[in-house]
Image (tube, rainbow, N blue to C red):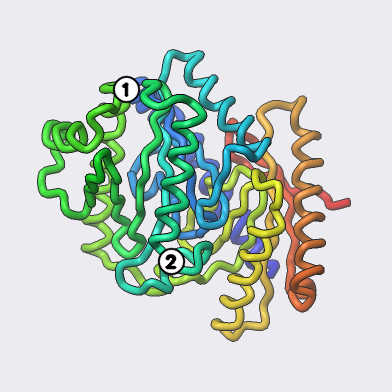
């Protein structure tokens, strides 16, 4: 497992360098497309929206939980989500919220384990969460605009669910010009503010490009099926976007034990399928923005690591000996990871 840990350190270093090198590109993109974009998505390691939309790192704010299950009644989620909305409003910007589910067209068991591979149930749940956002912020408020979006993981294709039951599968788009997409998406979302619509189109164009590359190059089976061997708990994991290596559990669910149990169960199955005696990495993480917050971040990541180990010991005692612990903090300005000593 030391080799795996070194690999994660090297992966973070590579991502951090890329993140910092894209600073001007990110600033330019945001100056041209100022809409705040928030993504609610599954903990599944195959889901990485910057990759499937070909956008610079750091543009989208991710919230992750098993199956994309969320509830704005969760106190921490309620507060964190609202802070992102208010921050955008203070800059004069609106917010586009992508409420996502995912599935595989080729094999339902390559779909979402968080919903026991039941795509229809996944859609129902995430659609209800989208409606909860509307109920909370007001229908047709013009500032917070949530939409339901599917991701077909075999082709990396986004599927947009519009108003009045309309659906648009990006893999079926022939003309990806801005003018053509603007007309199509205006029909799909007639109530969407024009500023948000303008800033949605580049995401769609990026997905068109991604789909073409995926179809031309093909996708190895090991990237399409569950194969994760990292359980990542906390925040700040956008650097961990190598396909299919990690299940990511955000800290928002008050009953965080449930997604952790589910994730460990999936990883245990993955290890059994691979017939490997190696264990898995428990990677806890917390993000800090300045020196004053750094010590608090250390406490958060230590707590999440200890809590997760307690849950594993309680429900998967046989996995404790196979658990290799890494506790880290992430600098929000550089995305650089720093290991900390566990208590």
For label 1, the SS is helix
Residue shown at 20%/31% (left/top)? 186
Query: Measuring 55% from the left and 82% from the top, which residue is drawn there?
Result: 274
| Residue 76 makes an appearance in the image | yes
Helix or strand or loop: what does disc 2 sit on?
A: loop
Q: Residue 259 occupies which quadrant of the picture?
A: bottom right
Residue 230 location in percent, x, y? 62, 63
Image marks 2 and 1: residues in contact by CB distance under 8 Å: no
Quadrant placement of the N terminus: bottom right
Name the residue furthest bottom: 275
Up/down of 26 relative to 117, above or below: above
Left or right, 216 with reference to 258 = left
Counting residues from the N terminus, which is met first, the one under dot 2 or under dot 1?
1
Residue in the picture at 10% in, 44% down: 175
According to the image, label 1 marks what residue? Answer: 32
Tag shown at residue 118 = 2
Query: How many marks are shown on the rendered structure?
Result: 2
């Amino acid at each position: 497992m030391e080799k795996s840990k070194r690999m994660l350190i090297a992966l973070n270093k590579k991502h951090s360098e890329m993140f910092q090198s894209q600073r001007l590109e990110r600033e330019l993109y945001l100056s041209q497309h100022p809409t705040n974009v928030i993504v609610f998505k599954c903990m599944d390691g195959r889901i990485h929206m910057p990759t499937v939309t070909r956008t610079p790192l750091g543009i989208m704010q991710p919230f992750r939980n098993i199956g994309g299950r969320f509830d704005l009644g969760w106190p921490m989620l309620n507060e964190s989500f609202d802070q992102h909305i208010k921050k955008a409003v203070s800059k004069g910007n609106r917010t586009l919220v992508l409420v996502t589910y995912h599935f595989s067209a080729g094999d339902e068991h390559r779909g979402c384990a968080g919903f026991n591979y039941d795509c229809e149930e996944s859609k129902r749940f995430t659609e209800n969460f989208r409606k909860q956002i509307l109920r909370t912020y007001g229908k047709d408020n013009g500032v917070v605009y949530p939409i339901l979006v599917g991701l077909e993981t075999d082709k990396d294709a986004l599927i947009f669910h519009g108003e009045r039951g309309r659906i648009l599968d990006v893999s079926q788009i022939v003309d990806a010009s801005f003018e053509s997409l603007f007309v199509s998406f205006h029909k799909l979302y007639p109530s969407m503010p024009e500023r948000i619509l303008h800033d949605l189109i580049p995401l769609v164009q990026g997905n068109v490009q991604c789909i073409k590359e995926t179809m031309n190059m093909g996708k190895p089976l090991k990237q399409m099926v569950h194969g994760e061997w990292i359980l990542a708990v906390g925040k700040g994991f956008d650097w961990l976007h190598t396909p299919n290596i990690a299940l990511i559990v955000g800290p928002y669910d008050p009953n965080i034990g449930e997604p952790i149990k589910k994730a460990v169960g999936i990883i245990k199955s993955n290890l059994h399928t691979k017939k490997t005696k190696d264990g898995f990495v428990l990677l806890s993480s917390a993000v800090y923005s300045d020196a004053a917050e750094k010590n608090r971040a250390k406490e958060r990541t230590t707590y999440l690591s200890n809590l997760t180990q307690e849950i594993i010991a309680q429900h998967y005692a046989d996995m404790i000996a196979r658990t290799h612990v890494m506790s880290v903090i992430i600098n929000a300005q550089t995305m650089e990871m720093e290991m900390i000593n566990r208590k």
